[in-house]
Image (cartoon, helix red, strand yellow):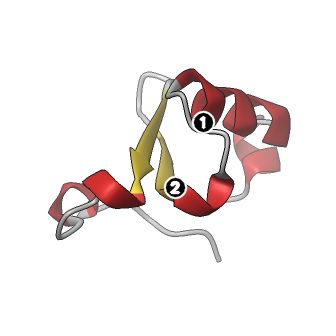
């Protein structure tokens, strides 16, 4: 699904990244739209083996 289909703007994604204290999108492994509508941001340094992303669809 696209951001547009989920009615999430790029500004909202960037705001979620900034809220984690990161100013560099390159340091982010994933931003996940959760079932409650919140955005979870996973940094590359905390991504580990990415098992927490099992079942999350990646953008096409």
Secondary element at image label 1? helix
Quadrant of the image containing the C terminus: bottom right
Quadrant of the image containing the N terminus: bottom right
Of residues 6 and 23, the one nearer the viewer is: 23
Q: Specify few, some or many for label 1: CA neighbours under 10 Å numbering under 14, 14-19, or 20 or more.
A: many
Sequence-wise, which precedes: disc 1 or disc 2?
Answer: 1
Residue to which mark 1 is pinned: 17
Query: Could you say where residue 27 lies in the image, as x and y percent from the top left?
Result: 53, 58
For the residues bearing labels 1 and 2, Cβ distance under 8 angstroms? yes
Q: Is residue 34 left or right of residue 16?
A: left
Query: Could you say where residue 41 lies in the image, as x and y percent from the top left?
Result: 46, 41
State the residue at coordinates (66%, 54%): 25
Asked where in the image residue 57 lies, by quadrant, the reply is: bottom left
- Cα–Cα gap, marks 1 and 2: 8 Å
Q: Is residue 40 left or right of residue 48?
A: right
Residue to which mark 2 is pinned: 28
Secondary element at image label 2? strand
State the residue at coordinates (74%, 49%): 3
State the residue at coordinates (54%, 28%): 21
Of residues 20 and 58, the one nearer the viewer is: 20
Query: Could you say where residue 8 lies in the image, as x and y percent from the top left?
Result: 74, 36
Of residues 14 and 56, the one nearer the viewer is: 14
Q: Specify few, some or many for label 2: CA neighbours under 10 Å numbering under 14, 14-19, or 20 or more.
A: some
Single out the residue that lies furthest toward the bottom. Answer: 60
Asked where in the image residue 53 lies, by quadrant, the reply is: bottom left
């Amino acid at each position: 699904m696209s951001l547009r289909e989920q009615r999430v703007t790029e500004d909202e994604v960037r705001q979620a990244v900034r809220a984690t204290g990161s100013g560099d999108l390159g340091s982010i492994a994933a931003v996940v739209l959760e079932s409650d509508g919140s955005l979870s941001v996973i940094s590359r340094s905390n991504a580990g083996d990415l098992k927490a992303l099992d079942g999350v669809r990646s953008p096409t």
